[in-house]
Each structure stands twice: as structure tokens, then as C-alpha cells.
Image (cartoon, rainbow, N blue to C red):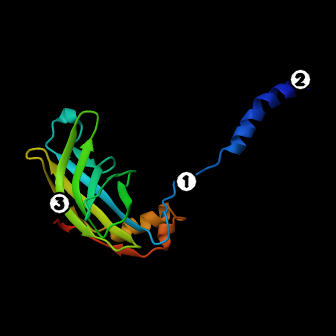
Amino acid sequence: MKKWRGVLSLLLPVLVLGACVTKTTYKVEPSEPGSTLLIGQINLDFTGFPNDYQINGPHGKGLLLRFVDEYGNRTSVTAYGKEALFGFEASADSYVLSSIEFSNDRVSATIDMNWACDITSGQVNNLGMVEGVWQAANNTLNLAPSGGHDALKKYFIERYPESGWNGATWTNVGFYAGR
């Protein structure tokens, strides 16, 4: 009997703690009905940087994108996950992607941008995939939308099946030369 008490005294905390832990998944939810989401995916290929910077090659995750709305309000958003998603709840009708920043433990690089997009209130505004090449020689970034709207929507719905955004209308939007 003493043997079982010892085993139970060891197992009981594990069983109690195990019962208290619940599996949670990240939910992307609108803050209120009629909210607006701007979402996209990014992948940049860095070339010509010194090898010790450990930056050459494709990057998406960890890029910091800075947006400015038509009223001058600034929003910064970091691309996350292996899919390099970025997104934020929007409150204006148009935004300019004003800069993109990359940093690791050896280098930090920022490039100014002037890409605008108009969005529709109360909908998910899908930028799709944005790809580019960041060249060290002259610190330029050749950026271009590459479609992928349907793939991004499909991924989002599969990854976040319970999200309130899935019931909203999805509109494909794109960038153009800024104001």
C-alpha cells in the first residue's frame, strides 16, 4: 500500500496539471463586426551582401513592414511564420508601404518604399504574395506582386478555420506607385 501511495503522490500532480492545460491555437479575429483586414505574404531574395552577414538568400519571416495611412498614422507589422504572413486591422481607405526592414544579429537594413494600396472597408483585403530582390551593391529593392491571392486565402482559411474573417468578403487588392 505504501508503494501505491508513493506512486500516487508522484502521479497526482502530473494528472492535475495535465487536466488544467488546454490546447489553444492562435486565433485571428476581427475586433468588431464590420472590421477591415489588410493581409499579404512576402518573400525577398537578398543578394551581394558579405557572407559573414548571413543574409543572402530568401527571407520572409521577420521582415518589418511599415505602412502609413492617408491621415499620416503609422502601422508597423512583422511578417511571421514560415509562410511570411503579414496583416493588420485597417481603419483607413488607403495605405502606403513606406519601408521594409530586415535585421538579424549581424546586420540591419532598411529600404524606403512608396507603394500604395486602396482597400475596401468591412472586408478582407488580400494583397497576395509580394516578392522581390534586395541588392546590396546599390541598396535597391525590386519588388513586384506575384499573384497568389487564391493560395493565400486558402491557406488562411485552412490555418484559421474558426476565424471570423472567413465569413467576410475577400477582395483582391494590389500595390501601385504611391502618392
Q: Report x, y in % for residue 110.
A: 20, 46
Q: Report x, y in % for residue 139.
A: 12, 47
Residue name at image x 29 percent, y 58 percent: 73
Q: Around disc 2, counting alpha carbons within 10 Å, would you say few (fewer than 14), some (14 to 19), or many (20 or more)?
A: few
The amino acid type found where label 1 is placed reads Thr
Mark before the other along the chain sequence, 3 or 1: 1
Mark 3 or 1, which is nearer the eye?
3
> Along the line of sight, which residue is nearer the eye, 57 or 141?
141
Residue furthest right in the image: 1
Q: Secondary structure at mark 2?
A: helix
Q: Report x, y in % for residue 40.
A: 33, 62
What is the spatial separation of the Cα atoms under label 3 and label 1, in whole angstroms? Answer: 35 Å
The amino acid type found where label 3 is placed reads Asn
Q: Secondary structure at mark 3?
A: strand
Residue furthest left in the image: 138
Residue name at image x 74 percent, y 39 percent: 16
> Along the line of sight, which residue is nearer the eye, 36 or 163?
36
The mark found on residue 2 in the picture is: 2
Residue corresponding to mark 3? 114
Residue name at image x 24 percent, y 47 percent: 101
Q: Around disc 3, counting alpha carbons within 10 Å, would you say few (fewer than 14), some (14 to 19), or many (20 or more)?
A: some
Give left or right: position of 6 versus 56: right
Q: Report x, y in % for residue 34.
A: 46, 72
What is the spatial separation of the Cα atoms under label 1 and label 2, in whole angstroms? Answer: 41 Å
Residue corresponding to mark 1? 25
Mark 2 or 3, which is nearer the eye?
3
The amino acid type found where label 2 is placed reads Lys
Residue furthest front in the image: 71
176 in relation to 85, above or below: below
Mark 1 or 2, which is nearer the eye?
1
Q: Are marks 3 and 1 in contact (CB under 8 Å)?
A: no
Mark before the other along the chain sequence, 1 or 2: 2
